[in-house]
Image: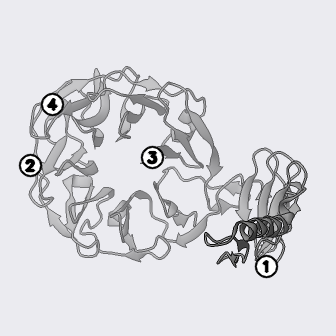
Amino acid sequence: MATTTPNFGWDIPQSTDLVKDGATAIAALGTDIDTALVDLKGGTTGQVLSKNSNTDLDFTWVAQDDSNAIQNAIVDAKGDLISATAADTPARLAVGTNGQVLTADSTQSTGLKWSTPATGFTWTHREANKITMQEIAYDGSSLYVAVGSSGTLYTSTNGTTWTSRTSGFGANDIFGVGYGNGLWVAVGTNGTITTSPDGITWTARTSNMSTNDIMAVTYANSVWVAVGGGGGSTNTGGITYSTDGITWTRKSQTLTVGARYYDAAWNGTNWIVVADSSTNNYLYASTPSGTWTAGATGSAGSVYFIAWDGTRNLTIEGTAYVSRYSTSTTLGTTTTYTNGHQGEQAYSGAYFYYNNLLYISNTRYFGSLVPATSATTTVYPGQLLPMITRSTTPFINSHAGAIFVGAIGIIWASQYGIFTSF
């Protein structure tokens, strides 16, 4: 006597059935299977099975673009995107035109639109004090410090609201500021150095740089290095260094290099200090307390800026303020990036390296370039910086001011105050 399968109830013979009953059960099983699988019959090329109801084995053949799938026909051109106008409601977003970028726009049905990027930044005036600013630094987590002439020092936790602080410089100009190992260090005219643990309270330190101006300060490889005037054969200043930022030691050295040192960078092997030109225009050493060697980059004139991007030394140098680079850890001869506008942008400029872009600003323009492995580089168009106008004629500041570029955006400071791109 036949029984049924547990899942679909198909008749199946049993081992105890008589021969004639077993044949009958087999016939019944075949009929049950044929009936149950009837929905698998038919269909055309390219169709797929789709459940027709919640009933077991109830299927129907449909085209691949069924009502529960995104239809092929929703896109009809190269570059089209699939978006949505609401939950479970896909929609086509037609491809934009060359150079456009995709932006969020809640007024559009899909919440997205293609738009042409703006030709310049939108600058917001954050601080109106018309003091010539020299540098902006960030501690990497919570505080920005901007410094400038006449001892001006501002701090901000967000880049938008700035508070004036007593820097300890008096009437002396502050040329540079840096952060490292939990300490802020500011440097400027007359050999002045002050330090702060929080950017708010500043304490004067002895630089041992006599009355020479200190132009820049850098923390790397567990040591502070500050550079300025009195270098070269003058040997009254040049380089002073500190392991804690509190006690400073001047490095005595008499080299055939310009007396004013402008900037310093650590490239993982050597400290490179760039300077005015006098046969040579830079010097290098593996430690600031060690032996320094002078060298020439091959360009005519001084070197004003240096940064290390992990592969190359990036410099601004020469009488035309041209962007150059070198892969040597001892700098050596530098190669000019091919760009006819770099000199114009960099003239009397401020410079900042961030995320594989070298940012340059002068009295009127802000731009950036991508350092490349060859002499050719991609240059971003210069953007007009905010200026105070006198009647209809732009009143151009004779100083480029300071720039900071980070994930937050761009902070630019000059004689007209502090501006941000955010």
Mark 2 Cα shell of 10 Å, populated few (<14), some (14-19), many (≥20): some
Identify the amino acid type marked 4.
Trp
Q: For residue 70, say whether it is visible.
A: no
Kindly indicate whether the residue at mark 3 contacts the one at mark 2 (C-beta within 8 angstroms). no
Q: Residues within 10 Å of mark 4 (few under 14, many from 20)?
A: many
First in sequence, mark 2 or 3: give its number.
2
What secondary structure is found at the residue carrying circle 2? Answer: strand
Q: Quadrant of the C terminus?
A: bottom right
Left or right: 251, with 124 as reference point: left
**Of label 1 and label 2, which has the lower sequence position?**
1
Q: To which residue does mark 2 refer?
A: 249
> Which one is in front, 330 or 96?
96
Badge 1 amino acid: Thr
Give the number of the mark in front: 1 or 2: 1
The residue lying at 78 percent from left, 56 percent from top is: 81
Mark 3 lies on a secondary structure that is strand
Which residue was labeled with disc 3? Answer: 351
Residue at mark 4: 292
User: Which amino acid, mark 2?
Assistant: Thr
Q: Where's residue 292, x and y in %?
A: 15, 31
Mark linked to residue 55 = 1
Of tags 1 and 3, the one toward the viewer is 1
